[in-house]
DNA sequence: ATATATTTTCAGAAATAATTGAAAATTAGA
DNA sequence: TCTAATTTTCAATTATTTCTGAAAATATAT
């Protein structure tokens, strides 16, 4: 397969996958473009590479930086800003889990705790409390496990272990 | 907290969370409604409970059945169809992972394998091959692990173990 | 077979999300 | 300071997704 075709297919595939997971297509495509770029890129390069507007590029680059997946690089003697992506896919996955946990899972756990205080004065309310209790226990277990894994991954020895496989 | 408020808050929260994960809001809300319902519900009950149209209810119930999260119940002497949800949240999580793996991850793994055959005849192409190789190894490892966990979870002993926590 | 209840489909409407492009703001050199 | 390069913002536009509602299809009872 020719490089140009492979690159386009990768960017398109990454964008589609992201969409299915609630992440906007352009954001994923910029990430893909930067991941496979040997050099950091400026806004115009990204605009040209993906055929998108300046505003769109700017907004999604900012979001990617908020997610901790892309970083700004300032080159001496250059006025423009350059961008590069984290390329270690383990770190990318870890960062995504970390952010989603913080932004989405944590607030849900709070709501679940609140809902557990419901008055169980009817059949419906009792069933509700039972289901919420079940969800809450599992969610907390999953959250604690994820948290432990994230912490463990920051440990050198574990990283060495995983580097054998990845 | 009053039951009616708690129920509404749960349905709304579940819907929001789902949206952030690429699942449509109504589908998640129907799922939430059925999870906390002590009895199976018919289409009119769901329509009334969520204030949605018949078409919407029907379409999303079908999708939920495709995902293996909701099932039809036929009551003798009743002409209408009733629906009920899987309430064991471990089973729900497992089913979601299983389906997403089949629908989304598996196709991406195929594309990645294809992309690994790219000609590495330039700096860009070499970097591309390196990143794709990295992603592919990690994705395959994760996929294999998920698959193993799904299989293990079907094992009685493991289920007993988890049932202590959840 | 006919009537009635129920489910399914789907074109158009509504809602939501993403994108553009140009103006405003910011930054840094002369 | 002034000017030019660059980045950011955001109202308007465009694209995408979801939802409605009524007609068509299907199923069941008489």
Image (cartoon, coloured by chain):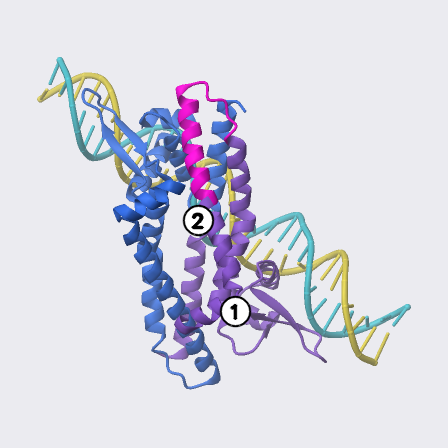
Chain colours: A purple, B blue, C yellow, D cyan
- Residue B22 position in % (x across, y down): 44, 49
Q: Is residue B50 visible?
A: no
Residue B15's place in the image compared with B96, above or below, is above
Does the magenta portion include B130? no
Chain letter for mark 1: A
- Residue B166 position in % (x across, y down): 39, 40
- Residue B156 position in % (x across, y down): 26, 46
Identify the residue at horizontal 52%, vertical 52% (top origin). Answer: A100
Identify the residue at horizontal 35%, vertical 41% (top origin). Answer: B163
Q: Main secondary structure of the magenta part?
A: helix
Identify the residue at horizontal 35%, vertical 30% (top origin). Answer: B54
- Residue A38 position in % (x across, y down): 52, 78
Residue lying farthest to the bottom in this orientation: B121
Chain letter for mark 2: B
Element at label 2: loop
Mark 2: few/some/many CA within 10 Å (<14, 14-19, 20+): some
- Quadrant housing residue A129: top left
C21 on left or right of B161: right
- Residue that label 1 marks: A156
Identify the residue at horizontal 43%, vertical 77% (top origin). Answer: B130
B35 on left or right of D7: left
Element at label 1: helix
Task: State the quadrant of the N terminus of chain B.
Answer: top right
- Residue that label 2 marks: B22
Q: Is residue B32 visible?
A: yes
Mark 1: few/some/many CA within 10 Å (<14, 14-19, 20+): few
- Quadrant housing residue B45: top left
Q: Which sits in the foreground, D16 or B63?
A: B63
Residue extent of the magenta highlight: A116-140
Q: Which sits in the foreground, D1 or A7?
A: A7
């Amino acid at each position: 397969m020719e490089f140009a075709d492979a690159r386009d297919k990768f960017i398109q595939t990454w964008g589609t996958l992201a969409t299915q997971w609630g992440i906007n297509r352009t954001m994923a495509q910029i990430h893909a473009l930067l991941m496979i770029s040997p050099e950091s890129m400026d806004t115009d390069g990204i605009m040209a590479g993906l055929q998108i507007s300046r505003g769109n590029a700017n907004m999604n680059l900012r979001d990617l930086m908020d997610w901790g997946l892309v970083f700004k690089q300032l080159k001496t003697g250059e006025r423009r800003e350059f961008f590069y992506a984290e390329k270690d896919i383990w770190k990318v996955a870890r960062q995504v889990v970390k952010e989603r946990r913080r932004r989405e899972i944590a607030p849900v756990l709070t709501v679940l705790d609140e809902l557990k205080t419901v008055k169980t004065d009817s059949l419906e309310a009792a069933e509700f409390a039972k289901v919420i209790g079940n969800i809450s226990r599992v969610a907390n277990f999953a959250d604690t496990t994820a948290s432990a894994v994230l912490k463990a991954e920051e440990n050198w020895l574990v990283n060495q272990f995983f580097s054998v496989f990845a």
